[in-house]
Amino acid sequence: MEKLNKIRTAMQAENLDALLITSPINRRYMSGFTGTAGVVLITLEKAIFITDFRYTSQASEQAKGFEVVEHKQAIELEIRDQLIMEKAKRVGFEKNQVTFAMYEQYKNIIEGELVPVSDLVENLRLYKSADELAVMKKAAEIADAAFQHIQGFIKPGVKEIEVSNELEFFMRRQGGRFLKLRHDCCIWLAISFTTWCRFAKRNSKRRTGNTGLRRPISGILF
């Protein structure tokens, strides 16, 4: 509820009636939902989570304080209908997350004014709660333990993929969880970013032939 109150304060500063959140990271931060399909729609009075039939049960369990709506038509049409019911006239959207093609689609079906905004949720994420700080501390502890562990595993003849797998298995055994948000963005929840292993003589190559590993956008390099 505290996050919703803060985001509504930010919305009022932008004179918004509603805010559409489509970024997977911001969606999870605001709602707690860890699935892969859905959007968050926040008005000054309601918090709505729109998803399909596969995730309604999960959303009901995880998105506390949100009304879960199952869309049985295109999700964009459900967003439109919810905005009409809430009588929202100025609708903020994440301009750094929405493609121009998607913006045009929203513009053609949403009756209100679409307002591009940035960093409303990101600014909230800058300030960590006690629970978030505890997760970050645990993440650092697991990463430190993983680094110590892998030093004893690496030896001549061990392949990069074997080192990467060993790191992943070790961190999972310590309580880490892995979440793929996009094809190019993988996050270790309560650990770190995706593991990327390269040996010295091949560390300048973006893609190697026998490992099939592609350098991620961000990660821990061993």
Image (tube, rainbow, N blue to C red):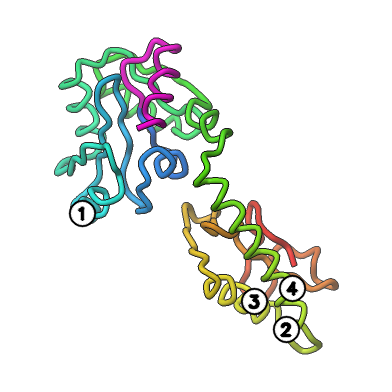
Q: How far separated are the C-alphas under marks 2 and 3? A: 18 Å
Q: Earlier in the sequence, mark 3 or mark 4?
A: 4
Residue appearing at x 75%, y 67% in the figure: 222
Mark nearest the camera among 2 and 4 is 4
Q: How far separated are the C-alphas under marks 3 and 1? A: 38 Å
Location of residue 173 in the rendering, given as x and y in whole percent from the top left corner: 53, 75
Mark nearest the camera among 1 and 4 is 4
Q: Quadrant of the N terminus?
A: top left
Location of residue 211 in the rendering, given as x and y in whole percent from the top left corner: 64, 76
Residue appearing at x 59%, y 76% in the figure: 170
Mark nearest the camera among 3 and 1 is 1
Q: Which residue is mark 3?
A: 211
Q: How far separated are the C-alphas under marks 3 and 4? A: 23 Å
Location of residue 190 in the rendering, given as x and y in whole percent from the top left corner: 54, 57
Q: Which residue is mark 1?
A: 57
**Local SS, label 4:** helix
Would you call the spot at circle 1 few (<14 residues within 10 Å), some (14-19), or many (20 or more)? few
Q: Which residue is mark 2?
A: 153
Highlighted range, magenta: 1-19
Residue 193 can be seen in this image:
no
Q: Which residue is mark 4?
A: 148
Mark nearest the camera among 2 and 3 is 2
**Local SS, label 1:** helix
